[in-house]
Amino acid sequence: MREGENNVDGNLKLTNAERAIMECLWDSENGLTFKDLIDRMSEKFDKVWKKQTLSTYINSLQKAGLIRTDSWRRPYTYHAVCTKDDFLHNQSTKLVEDEYDNSLRNFIASFVGDQKLPADEVQELKDLIDQLCQDGSEF
């Protein structure tokens, strides 16, 4: 990640560790202290995390605009800036824009490829499209 880059709306590839940090924060309603975060990461990866290593990842995610710190209270509390759903939506949108000429049809065709979709999934997609059309949404 590059310094000053806000990746909430951008195309960001998280490392496994960064993704795990974000998962921990997304799962927490009130944020996590550094100690809580290091404990959860150690449990998730079944290894002891060094403070400096976790601190480096946190700083990187802060610079990317994905997490914020409540520094007005001690110990500091870390929070995700956006929900997991918002993050995934923004990442998916950016992928379709950049790699599929902003065409959802091209994305779905590429994603499905030679596979046969089960009838129930085809119906769910049709229902979703119908619902979006009724809501006045444009693709």
Image (cartoon, rainbow, N blue to C red):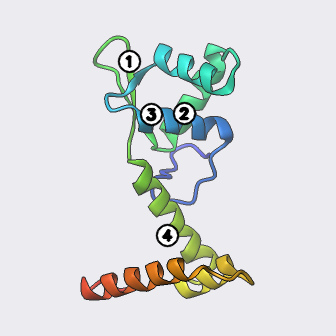
- Name the one closer to the observer, 62 or 75: 75
**Element carrying mark 3:** helix
Which amino acid lies under the numbered mark 3 shown in the image of this protein?
A: Leu
**Which residue type carries mark 2?**
Ile
Quadrant in the picture for residue 139: bottom left
Give percent across and percent down for residue 115. Answer: 71, 80
Question: Mark 1: which amino acid?
Answer: Tyr
Q: Earlier in the sequence, mark 4 or mark 2?
A: 2
Number of the label disc, if any, that sits on residue 25: 3
Residue behind mark 2: 21
Disc 4 from disc 1: Cα separation: 33 Å
Q: CA distance from mark 2 to mark 1?
A: 16 Å
Apparent side of residue 35 relative to residue 82 in the rendered image (left or right): right
Q: Are marks 2 and 3 in contact (CB under 8 Å)?
A: yes
Q: Which residue is mark 4?
A: 93
Q: Position of residue 125 (x, y in %)?
A: 46, 81
* Disc on the earlier residue, 2 or 1: 2
Q: Which residue is mark 1?
A: 76
Mark 1 nearby-residue class (10 Å; few <14, some 14–19, many ≥20): some
| Type of amino acid at the residue the image marks with label 4 | Thr
Residue drawn 46% across the image and 43% down it:
66
In the displayed structure, would residue 115 be above or below residue 57?
below
Q: Residue furthest left?
A: 135
